[in-house]
Image (spheres, coloured by chain):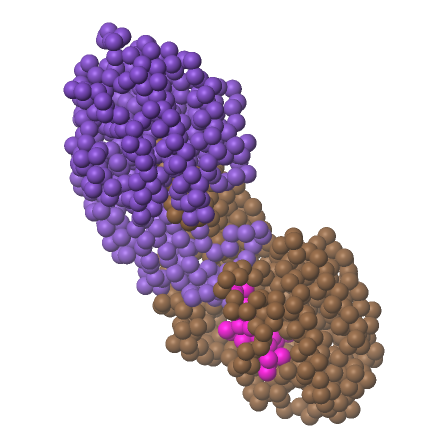
Chain colours: A purple, B brown
């Protein structure tokens, strides 16, 4: 493949990285100790502390112009190094906020006290996304401290609201078009297909999230005294939810599939090259049986088909024992995952219209629309895509797989639209990292190899870009 | 109607009752201050304290042989007075335990700090059932302290587990057939039709309660990464619940109505004499619209038809903000209210079989059957029924209405079966007492008039029994 250009400092950078694994690990532990849960107001101070910690780490790495841009919510950490004349510019994106850590009882070790077991570090946010953000910084540090310079220009834009929908970075980007201008974006917030099986994500699902409240009687009523004569909001809610998606996973909202284009043969081939060991997959998820739309493969269901899930439901008495009531209300949190041809706002409106039509007059409805994000598809023939593929081959000995990811990284669509850049999504998580769940972990060999992969990516891109 | 027999001491008893209203009220406040929530382990000590308080109050009233019978759960308070030779014996039943008081935020004053506003006292358990238990004791006290004797023999059996299903009293009764032998039972745990509109409940619905757990993946999964390929336990649960009852309230479990006899014309006439002001009823419940089985009147739906309600549901993320997961499990608490011809155990089994058949192989099910109770119907021509009706006329100036109550008082069916006694269900609550809900209240005129009504009932029954 490519000859590594010794004169851009790759060897020196790799040498530096290999000399400092325990420093890097100690820094990762520090970063993970900060409970930067962006969805919980009581953690606002921790989120700020994580931003400041990261900014300081970036300064020490050799990045310049490092600062926190305030937003209406949590700050955006920016830093750059722009001394590679005539070389392209890479805009790195990641996030320093994390998901909530409940249910705490299910964590083997506390979520904000990083613990190493076998080859993995366990802590909330280690894979999603602090470990991956830090490895980007360490790759750049390896060039700057090991070789004295970078082969390309770099900019970092690391946000603190990815887990809450990233509304403020969506406003920040159009206001800072010049500051953020770049030739390509690089996002490390995705996962390998398996150990030593790097994967480049070229498509991401979009999202539309909404909460629904159903209210019936104005207070909880005795289910004996009133049962049979008062519509129960929980029963009404289940009738509605049952009509949103059939039992095979096909969404029933009118118009939902109107703009969804059939998958091309080329895409189906590419996607189905991502081998999935069904037994392992089943053992990992613990789901008793494979499930989903009958006309699509598991690979297709996982990233290339839109879907709908209830993320949470609550109503009535949920404590110990029983309480014989007809509850006054019930609540559901719903997210839909969308493919590129679907307009999130339109899909959301279709859901609202449909639920409104389904709801009987004996209950009242409240909708709380939450975040939306368009899906995205990136160009497989971009020079940076080739540079990333070559880096994978150099470090892991094989070309990456190409896949469409089921999760949403709304910023990718926005950077494409506002900054005119394609995004390389080459992340270093593993499919079983338990992101968003108890006992989240990050495979440490991927942390160290990730640093070297990004070093090679930057060198390759300097040559190809 | 009846001539009150001055020589049984009725006048003296009434005089005594009218001299001690503030003492009675002070005792009621004391009783209500004890948070005897039987479904919560942390309140076990309080439940015991309520039993001891009641026993002491009964002793001071003049009852004899007062003691706490231990059970596997909370104790049963017993006491008697058996010196009315050749007179019949009344077995009083009530319960000193109360429902949980959440949601605490919705209480205008704290649930265990009784507050009087206008003519009502507000506290958890004031109407259901402490206020009613205490008025029975005060009626007996009025005879014993005011007249020196009672015109009939009385026994009290007051339990502490009515709100948890009363499993232990169900074992206690068959073990104490001699101790509890009586000619009739009297239960004050029901409500008037309206202010000054006493009602005798001659039928009670039974119950079958069950909790269902549905499990999917072994841990919460990212709804983007796995959505479309893992059956979501909440979605699966809503599909199942939606098939338990249709949107008009008709239960869909196979066999559910098999033994349900059509209502006779005589019963329909009696039941529909219970006038319901639909506008008031709607305003009280706050339900946007009347609802229920189209072929039955509101009165019939409320007590004479079986039904099914989800009392509580929970699954996934229910905190502030959002969390994009496919949850690992979902939980629902379900109760069915049954009519006399239905066998609770059979109905429960039918539900289990049906849900098992409905559940897809992509989730696993766990059932936790909870309490059951048969429905009951009492003889409208019993002498004690007539004595109670006469007492109503004496105190409230009109005959009582006769109704079937939607709630379950399983002990009524059991006393009929084990002790061979009919039960008079003449309670002094009001339909809007908010039992089981925040801001439960008890209309104080019904507390005082209830004492006098029970005094007259005992005198009348001595004559008729």
Q: Is residue B438 above or below residue B314?
A: below
Where in the figure is residue A301, as x and y percent of width and height?
Answer: 30, 31
Name the residue rendered at 57%, 66% in the picture. Answer: B110
Name the residue rendered at 18%, 37% in the picture. Answer: A177
Q: Which residues are magenta?
A: B424-447
Q: Quadrant of residue B59?
A: bottom right
Q: Is residue B382 above or below residue B241?
A: below
Along the horizontal axis of the image, is A165 left or right of B377?
Answer: left
Q: Looking at the picture, tell me which residue is in the foreground, B304 or A80.
A: A80
- Does the stretch in magenta take in B443? yes
Where in the figure is residue A238, as x and y percent of width and height?
Answer: 39, 51
**What secondary structure predominates along the stretch shown in magenta?**
loop
Q: Quadrant of residue A376?
A: top left
Along the horizontal axis of the image, is B55 left or right of B424?
Answer: right
| Residue B417 in view here | no
Where in the figure is residue B310, as x and y percent of width and height?
Answer: 47, 54
Along the horizontal axis of the image, is A236 left or right of B77?
Answer: left
Q: Is residue B318 above or below residue B147?
A: above
User: Which image quarter holds the N terminus of chain A?
Assistant: top left
Where in the figure is residue B108, as x and y percent of width and height?
Answer: 51, 69
User: Which image quarter holds the C terminus of chain A?
Assistant: top left
Along the horizontal axis of the image, is A238 left or right of B189?
Answer: left
Name the residue rendered at 39%, 47% in the picture. Answer: B321
Q: Quadrant of residue B382?
A: bottom right
């Amino acid at each position: 493949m490519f000859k590594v250009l010794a004169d851009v400092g790759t060897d020196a950078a790799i040498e530096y990285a290999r000399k400092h694994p325990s420093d890097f690990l100690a820094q990762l532990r520090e970063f993970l100790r900060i409970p930067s849960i962006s969805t919980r107001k009581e953690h606002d101070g921790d989120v700020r502390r994580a931003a400041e910690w990261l900014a300081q780490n970036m300064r020490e790495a050799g990045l310049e112009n490092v600062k926190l841009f305030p937003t209406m919510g949590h700050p955006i950490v920016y830093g750059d190094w722009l001394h590679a004349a005539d070389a392209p510019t890479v805009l790195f994106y990641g996030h320093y906020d994390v998901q909530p850590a409940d249910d705490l009882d299910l964590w083997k070790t506390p979520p904000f006290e990083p613990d190493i077991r076998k080859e993995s570090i366990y802590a909330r946010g280690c894979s999603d996304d602090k470990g991956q953000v830090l490895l980007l910084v360490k790759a750049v540090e390896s060039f700057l401290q090991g070789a004295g310079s970078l082969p390309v220009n770099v900019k970092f834009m690391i946000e603190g609201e990815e887990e809450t929908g990233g509304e403020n970075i969506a406003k920040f980007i159009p206001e800072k078009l010049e500051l953020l201008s770049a030739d390509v974006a690089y996002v490390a917030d995705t996962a390998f297909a398996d150990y030593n099986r790097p994967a480049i994500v070229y498509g991401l699902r979009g999202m539309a999230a909404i909460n629904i409240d159903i209210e019936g009687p104005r207070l909880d009523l005795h289910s004996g005294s009133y049962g049979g004569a008062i519509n129960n909001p929980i029963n009404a809610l289940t009738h509605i939810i049952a009509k949103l998606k059939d039992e095979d996973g096909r969404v029933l909202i009118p118009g939902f599939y109107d703009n969804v284009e059939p998958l091309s043969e080329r895409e189906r081939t590419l996607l189905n090259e991502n081998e999935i060991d069904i037994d392992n997959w089943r053992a990992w998820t613990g789901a008793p049986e494979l499930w989903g739309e009958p006309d699509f493969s598991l690979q297709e269901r996982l990233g290339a088909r839109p879907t709908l899930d209830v993320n949470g439901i609550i109503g009535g008495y949920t404590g110990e024992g029983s309480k014989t009531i007809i509850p006054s209300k019930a609540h559901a949190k719903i997210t839909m995952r969308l493919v590129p041809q679907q307009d999130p706002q339109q899909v959301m409106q279709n859901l609202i219209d449909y639920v409104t039509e389904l709801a009987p007059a004996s209950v009242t409805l409240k909708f709380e629309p939450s975040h939306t994000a368009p899906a995205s598809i990136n160009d497989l023939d971009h020079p940076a895509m080739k540079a990333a593929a070559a880096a994978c081959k150099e470090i892991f000995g094989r070309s990456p797989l190409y896949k469409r990811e089921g999760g949403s990284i709304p910023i990718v669509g926005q950077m494409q639209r506002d900054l005119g850049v394609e995004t390389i999504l080459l992340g270093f998580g593993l499919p079983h990292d338990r992101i968003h769940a108890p006992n989240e972990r990050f495979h440490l060999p991927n942390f160290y190899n990730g640093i070297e992969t990004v070093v090679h990516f930057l060198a390759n891109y300097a040559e190809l870009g």
